[in-house]
Amino acid sequence: MDLFWIFILIMVIANILLNIMGTNIVRSSEIHDNNKKRNLLIMLWGIPMLGVFVAMIKINKDIKANQQKMEEEIAPAIREMADRLKVLDADIAMSKAKKNPKIH
């Protein structure tokens, strides 16, 4: 019976440590507003043992969605910059060709 209580004590301590780590991660999140952070903290502390994993899965999903959104917003700007560089490169090449005409 003593082993059972030792096991329970270890699980409770592990749960508290995981919840504290999860709380620090949620509070330091820059992509979530205060309302979303509050919901994640309630889930984190409200669901014993599973709350940590569910909250971390949700945070990772939100991070990936935010990253995808940023990539979608940045891609057109990168394409536009690449097009401008191509035009500039072509202009430089034509300018050099005009300055140094090759005699055949």
Image (spheres, helix red, strand yellow):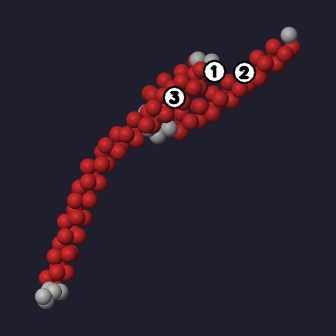
Which residue is rendered at x = 77% and y = 23% of the image?
10
Identify the residue at image location x=53%, y=26%.
55
- Please give the residue where the numbered disc 2 appears in the rendered image: 12
Residue located 58% across and 22% down the image: 51
The three-letter amino acid code for the residue at tag 3 is: Ile
Query: Where the N terminus falls, by quadrant?
Result: top right
Residue kind at label 2, given as amino acid type: Val
| Residue at image location 63% in from the left, 33% down from the top | 21
The image quarter containing residue 87 is bottom left
Q: Residue furthest bottom?
A: 103
Q: Quadrant of the C terminus?
A: bottom left
Q: Which residue is mark 3?
A: 57
Q: Residue furthest front?
A: 104
Name the mark on residue 49: 1
Residue at disc 1, secondary structure: loop
Residue 29 picture location, percent across and down: 50, 38
Q: Secondary structure at mark 2?
A: helix
The image shows residue 104, relative to residue 59, as above or below, that is: below
| Left or right for 98, reference 59 | left
**Near-viewer residue (25 or 93):** 93
Q: Residue furthest right?
A: 2
Q: Which of the marked residues, 2 or 1, is nearer the chain's N terminus?
A: 2
* Direction from residue 44 to residue 13 in the image, left or right: right
Residue 37 visible in the snapshot: no
Q: Residues within 10 Å of mark 2 (few under 14, many from 20)?
A: some
Marks counted in the figure total 3
Residue 81 visible in image: yes
